[in-house]
Image: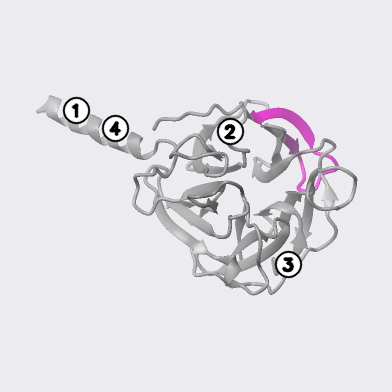
């Protein structure tokens, strides 16, 4: 009887491990989609991962045109909500639609998405998954790879990089700006936050009063630390993650149940490619001095 009980527990654990293996979605799953540029958020105790969508036939990024969301209450079992936002249904939003982000404030969830690569549109909803409605009827700003945080005091900030737009100093840098309380207007100019140039994929998170900024620099993801949300300048600390397998890395970071996780995508799974990517995540560890241990990619499928 004891052996049988042990065996059942072992099988349950194994089943959970299989469900939690990278990538999050497997090509054999019902409703499978290529989920790229994962922007992970925690709302109401659940994890929501907002992803851009690579088409099954993609040979470049120009066919990216809508967004999907994945949901989990335990980081093991995932619900695929499928495509939840199609910005091209809005008369003003056309062109390539790459990495998005979602933020919550005052009862509304705000979905920030790029169109024509660098024009930032916004949709809003009362739930984390939709249905989404237009929050604006034109771009709110121009930046590449938008990401938004709402600080403990309620002040919201938007970040990105300017390698495809002409903002401020020559070259591409981590950029940041305040948002007004309505979440759809800038409250001041864009500010350069990094001395160093970056390639793309800016993301920001906060831990124990420290702001962490990370971005892809060449093939690797590097990170910076600062004591304020709009520093001049954040301090470069080193490599956060190596080159993602067969994909230009785009990452995000969350805390869930006391643990920290690094979300990214890769193109070497699900019969994918550089332009057909799948979302994955790894647990992330901090050193005693608040610096981050370099991410190691694990592939279990």
User: Any magenta on residue 234?
Assistant: yes
Mark closest to the chain's N terminus, 2 or 4: 4
Q: Is residue 258 visible?
A: no
Query: Splitting the image into 4 quarters, where does residue 185 fall?
Result: bottom right
Q: How would you rate the neighbour count of disc 3 (Cα within 10 Å): few for under 14, some for 14-19, many for 20 or more?
A: some
Q: How would you rate the neighbour count of disc 2 (Cα within 10 Å): few for under 14, some for 14-19, many for 20 or more?
A: some
Mark closest to the chain's N terminus, 3 or 4: 4
Query: Splitting the image into 4 quarters, where does residue 198 fall?
Result: top right
Q: How would you rate the neighbour count of disc 1 (Cα within 10 Å): few for under 14, some for 14-19, many for 20 or more?
A: few
Q: Dot 4 lies on which element?
A: helix
Between the C-alphas of marks 3 and 4, the distance is 47 Å
The mark closer to the camera, 2 or 1, is 2
Q: Which residue is mark 1?
A: 6
Mark closest to the chain's N terminus, 2 or 1: 1
The mark closer to the camera, 2 or 4, is 2
Q: In the image, which disc is placed on residue 139? A: 3
Between the C-alphas of marks 2 and 4, the distance is 27 Å
Instruction: Assess whether mark 4 and mark 1 are in contact (beta carbons under 8 angstroms).
Output: no
In the rendering, at what x and y percent does residue 45 appear? 47, 52
Mark closest to the chain's N terminus, 3 or 2: 3
Read off the magenta span. 224-240
Q: Which residue is mark 2?
A: 244
Q: Dot 2 lies on which element?
A: loop
Q: Which residue is mark 4?
A: 14
In the rendering, at what x and y percent does residue 163 appear? 79, 46
Up/down of 208 relative to 220, above or below: below
């Amino acid at each position: 009887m004891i052996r049988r009980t042990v065996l059942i527990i072992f099988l349950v654990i194994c089943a959970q491990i299989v469900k939690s293996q990278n990538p999050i979605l497997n090509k054999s799953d019902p409703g499978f989609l290529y989920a790229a540029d994962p922007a992970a958020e925690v709302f109401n105790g659940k994890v929501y991962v907002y992803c851009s969508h690579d088409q099954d036939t993609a040979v470049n990024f120009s066919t990216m045109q809508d967004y999907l969301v994945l949901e989990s209450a335990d980081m093991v079992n995932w619900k695929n909500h499928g495509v939840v936002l199609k910005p091209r249904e809005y008369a003003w939003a056309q062109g390539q639609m790459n990495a998005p982000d979602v933020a919550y404030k005052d009862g509304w969830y705000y979905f920030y998405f790029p169109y024509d690569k660098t024009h930032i549109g916004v949709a809003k909803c009362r739930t984390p998954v939709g249905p989404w409605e237009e929050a604006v009827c034109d771009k709110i700003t121009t930046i590449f790879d938008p990401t938004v945080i709402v600080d403990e005091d309620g002040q919201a900030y938007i970040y990105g990089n300017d390698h495809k737009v002409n903002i401020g100093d020559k070259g591409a840098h981590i950029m940041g700006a305040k948002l007004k309380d309505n979440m759809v207007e800038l409250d001041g100019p864009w500010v350069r936050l990094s001395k160093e140039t970056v390639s793309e994929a800016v993301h920001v998170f906060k831990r124990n009063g420290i702001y962490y900024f990370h971005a892809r620099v060449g093939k690797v993801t590097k990170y910076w630390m600062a004591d304020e949300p709009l520093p001049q300048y954040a301090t470069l600390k080193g490599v956060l993650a190596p080159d993602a397998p067969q994909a230009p890395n785009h990452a995000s970071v969350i805390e869930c149940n006391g643990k920290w996780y690094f979300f990214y995508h890769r193109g070497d799974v699900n019969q994918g490619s550089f332009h057909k990517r799948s979302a994955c995540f790894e647990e992330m560890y901090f050193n005693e001095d608040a610096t981050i241990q370099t991410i190691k990619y694990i592939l279990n499928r």
